[in-house]
Image (tube, rainbow, N blue to C red):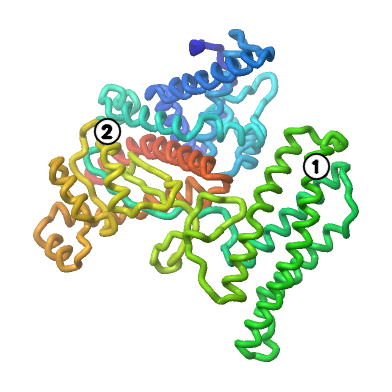
Amino acid sequence: MSKVISFQEFLSPEIVPVFGNKDYADHKRLLERVDRILHVSGLELRFVELSMERFDARVAKLEAAGEKVLSGPDAIGRYQQQSRQALRCMVLKNLISVGCRETSRQLAMCELYQWFCRVQRVPVVRAPSKSTLNDYAKWLPAEEMETLLDALGEALRDEARAKIIGLEHELDMAVVWVDSTCLKANIHFPVDWVLVRDGVRTLTGHILTIRRHGLLHRMPEPESFLRKMNGLCMAMSAGAGTKTGGKTDRKKERKKILRQMKALCDVVLKHARRYRGLLDDCWEESDLTRPEAEVILRGMDNVIAQMPEAKRQAHERVIGGRQVPSKDKILSLYESDIHVIVRGKAGAAVEFGNSLLLGETSDGYIMDHELMKDRSPGDPKWLEQRYPGMKKKSGGQLCGMITDRGFESKANRRMLEEDGVFNGLCPRNPQDLAERMEKDEVFAAALRRRAQTEGRVGILKNVFLDGTPRAKGFKNRQLQVAWAVLAHNLWVVARLPWACDQQAAAEAA
């Protein structure tokens, strides 16, 4: 691996002081503490080392292919500097809870953010663009982000480094509160006929793109398909047939509309296949490069392959009146790794996305997390699978596990008992729960504390992930969760000394 070399910082004038604004002062103090944590914990150095491993692998691959690559000290130094900026920009983006475009705009305006992200400020400000920030979001894969989180946890368990960071003692990881939730996917609510609409819109959009780049084949105006589909969708959504007021009439009208949608879909599919072949064979006659053409071809192939099943699924539900098993359903034409998750909660009886497990310590530090790609095996089995990793991440400190009743099972009770770990699994039987709450004060206190874990889940999802991740594809969603957890943990650790000061002040009063 290329050695991590030292390089000169950009010339950076002093940040103009701001007086009389407490919110700004608190935010500045937070970023200064996060900056210190990144240095002292070795997190920044580790991030650069992992980046250089990928840089070296990429250089070796290009050289083996006979391509010329700049890989001297100057190129290595620039890449390392960019890697450090990537880490800091992504941490900042998650801390201020905005998108890449807004992050780029604020970086261009705010001296404090420019200092934190090590943005060049002399002779001109060179703030990263939205596209560059999108690249930063994928700088390292999710697996290597996990090693960064482990490195941060290891540093916080070291009393010497914890004190340099500003903590009174190392982070307590003896007790873990575990919960699971659904991370919703950024998709339309999967009403079955909506898949037919999405397919027609997407394929028509690709046809328009191909025509715009110079490849033409005789066909009706593509926009006419969109107009017709929009009209059919409005009729379907409005509950067509209400003029008669009869339920049977509405069903008949919906069936009629779906048949028209399917006929329109068949026409669009025929034109899409023709244009797909035209682009594949004659892309050189357009102003597209082959890689650009490949992007369009992959998008068309993905939708064309799924449309027969999407039509069948809509037919089964609307015309046949039969349910389609969840395991066989297409929930989205564009996201294949999402599932129907039955939550059984008010306002969220059923959700569509991926299961997410979180384990937090008493200080609110997220010690363990996992976004499940496949269907969840169930909370009891999931906890059993994650337990060895939690023990390792706690540095052998783990001595208590608290969960809701969904995680309780005979196997998990036995697992904790054999390890001598406090069993804080909420019993499924209400009578057993009431009896244990009455007799075991430690268990009762731990279970009452579990309400804070619900809040922790909400903070991560609604603040650091902005409700529903906009990343496309499971790997990108998994990576977005890893960045959110990293920024959240830095935020928690940076604020711990303030919490101690406030507690001391309250006790003194």
Could you tell me which residue is drawn at 77 percent across and 53 percent down? 272
Q: Is residue 151 left or right of 290 when viewed as pictured?
A: left
- Number of the label disc, if any, that sits on residue 279: 1
Residue 463 on image: x %, y %: 48, 49
Instruction: Give the residue type that dot 1 points to.
Output: Leu
In the rendered view, tell whether residue 411 sits above or below residue 172.
below
Residue 90 on image: x %, y %: 53, 34
Q: Is residue 136 left or right of 46 when viewed as pictured?
A: right
Instruction: Give the residue type that dot 2 points to.
Output: Lys
Q: How many marks?
A: 2
* Residue 502 visible in the current orientation: no
In the rendered view, tell whether residue 213 sits above or below residue 272.
above
Decide: few, some or many residues near mark 1? Use Cα within 10 Å; few <14, some 14-19, many ≥20. many
Could you tell me which residue is drawn at 63 percent across and 42 percent down? 102
Q: Earlier in the sequence, mark 2 or mark 1?
A: 1
Decide: few, some or many residues near mark 2? Use Cα within 10 Å; few <14, some 14-19, many ≥20. few
Q: Secondary structure at mark 2?
A: helix
Q: Is residue 292 left or right of 367 when viewed as pictured?
A: right
Residue 406 on image: x %, y %: 29, 58
Could you tell me which residue is drawn at 58 percent across and 71 percent down? 316
Q: Secondary structure at mark 1?
A: helix
Task: Identify which residue, 283 or 461, lies in the foreground.
Answer: 283
Task: Identify which residue, 459 or 258, lies in the foreground.
Answer: 258
Residue 369 on image: x %, y %: 37, 42
Determine the CA span between mark 2 and mark 1.
Answer: 53 Å
Q: Is residue 489 left or right of 74 when viewed as pictured?
A: left
Cβ atoms under marks 2 and 1 closer than 8 Å? no
In the picture as drawn, the residue positioned furthest to the top comes out as 73
2 vs 1, front mark: 1
The quadrant where residue 151 appears: top left
- Number of the label disc, if any, that sits on residue 427: none
Q: Which residue in the protein does label 2 denote?
A: 392
